[in-house]
Image (tube, grey):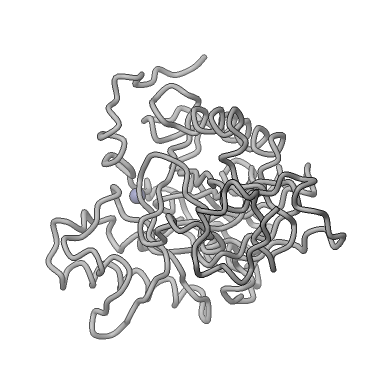
């Protein structure tokens, strides 16, 4: 029985501003038992994927287009009987993962996107899965040290086990006290996921002074660093998609104790991201698509349909991270930063 949803009367402008309306419920308890015995990994590991096929293929044979668009999907709570349009049932989430797999998408992290580290097999398309707010429905670690199956993380891991060529990874944007469980962040980093900044208190940054903005960012950054020592934090997601009045403070600043310098800033809404190798890519303003079944404008079902109907616009990998391959017709999109890696056909 589908729950009622707000239908297409939701304006796009509302989508742009309405993200992350809910907070962690704060009711769940930390699971007792074994720790994940994590090993902190560095940025390169967090953004990496298993080596693509070692056999070189010609870019034309897979219609490689590494200047095409990349969907960056935004999720919130994943639970039965969700309360709002930003939340989904486990069945809806699993169905979207199965769709992504069957349409040849392969997950990469937001950090991987920002630094241009997209190592997936030839002919596959990158997708970035992002989860906001660090809620217990997104991730919990059970007594056996593994993600609990009913969480988004558990479902993503299960889909990865069912499809060994679908490496599960995602980016988790957390506030202070994420997941109400100290084991989750170390587990995520140890298993190649990204954890990143979403401010200490889920603040509307536009309403704060410069000092207040930096306190929110630096404090959250320091908490993540303390939870995962040695881990390099690369990106942040703006609560509500709202920039501070001084936009630069969204990615760079200090509270006097902790300095932060982030390479990527994630928005809320409402279209695919340009390729990181395209001149139009703006790492400090990366659009995200709200996950949904097509009942509100510009959600993931809409955009996945669009990208399927217009495959020329979609990023397709050449399977070779050392090269940026694209058809000649797309050459004008190339960022001059990547001229030396360009492989036009
Ligand atoms: Zn949020």
x, y percent for residue 227: 47, 73
Q: Nearer the viewer, residue 282 or 301?
A: 282
Eyeballing the image, is 89 above or below 266? above
Q: Indicate left or right for 224 with 208 as reference.
A: right
How many numbered discs sit on the rendered protein?
A: 0
- Residue 131 sits above or below residue 89 on the image: below
Residue that sits furthest to the top in the current view: 1
Tell me the quarter of the picture where residue 113 sits. bottom right
Q: Residue at x 27, y 76 (%)?
A: 253
Residue visible at 56% across and 27% down? 305
In the rendered view, does 334 fall on the left or right side of 4? Answer: right
Which residue: 65% across, 65% down?
A: 48
Of residues 138 and 163, the one nearer the viewer is 163
Task: Tell me which corner region of the image, top left, top right, bottom left or bottom right, holds residue 15.
Answer: top left
Displayed quadrant of residue 258 = bottom left
Looking at the image, is 256 positioned above or below residue 286? Answer: below
Where's residue 84, x and y in %?
36, 30
Relative to residue 112, is residue 29 depicted above or below?
above
> Residue extending furthest bottom?
257
Q: Which residue is most to the right?
A: 55
Give how far across and how far down residue 112 sits, in percent.
56, 63
Q: Position of residue 165 (x, y in %)?
A: 78, 49
Front residue (pair 329, 193):
329
């Amino acid at each position: 029985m589908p729950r009622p949803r707000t239908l297409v009367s939701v304006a796009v402008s509302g989508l742009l501003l309405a993200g992350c309306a809910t907070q962690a419920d704060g009711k769940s308890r930390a699971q007792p038992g074994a720790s994940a015995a994590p090993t902190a990994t560095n940025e390169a590991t967090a953004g990496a994927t298993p080596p693509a096929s070692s056999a070189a293929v010609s870019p034309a044979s897979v219609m490689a287009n590494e200047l095409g668009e990349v969907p960056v999907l935004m999720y919130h709570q994943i639970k039965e009987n969700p309360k709002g349009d930003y939340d989904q049932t486990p069945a809806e989430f699993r169905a979207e993962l199965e769709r992504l797999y069957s349409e040849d998408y392969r997950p990469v992290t937001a950090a991987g996107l920002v630094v241009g580290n997209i190592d997936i097999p030839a002919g596959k398309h990158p997708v970035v899965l992002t989860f906001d707010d660090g809620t217990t429905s997104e991730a919990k670690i059970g007594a056996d040290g593994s993600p609990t199956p009913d969480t988004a993380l558990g479902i993503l891991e299960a889909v990865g086990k069912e499809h060994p060529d679908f490496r599960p990874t995602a980016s988790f944007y957390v506030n202070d006290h994420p997941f109400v469980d100290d084991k989750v962040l170390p587990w995520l980093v140890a298993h190649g996921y990204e954890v990143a900044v979403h401010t200490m208190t889920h603040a509307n940054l536009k309403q704060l002074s410069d000092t207040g903005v930096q306190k929110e960012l630096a404090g959250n950054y320091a908490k993540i660093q303390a939870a995962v020592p040695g881990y390099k934090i690369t990106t942040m997601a703006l609560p509500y998609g709202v920039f501070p009045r001084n936009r630069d403070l969204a990615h760079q600043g200090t509270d006097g104790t902790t300095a932060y310098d982030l390479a990527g800033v994630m928005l809320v809404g409402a279209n695919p991201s340009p390729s990181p190798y395209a001149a139009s890519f703006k790492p400090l303003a990366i659009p995200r698509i709200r996950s949904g079944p097509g009942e509100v404008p510009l959600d993931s079902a809409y955009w996945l349909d669009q990208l399927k109907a217009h495959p020329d616009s979609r990023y397709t990998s050449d399977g070779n991270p050392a090269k940026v391959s694209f058809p000649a017709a797309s050459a004008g999109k190339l960022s001059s930063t990547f001229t030396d890696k360009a492989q036009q056909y």
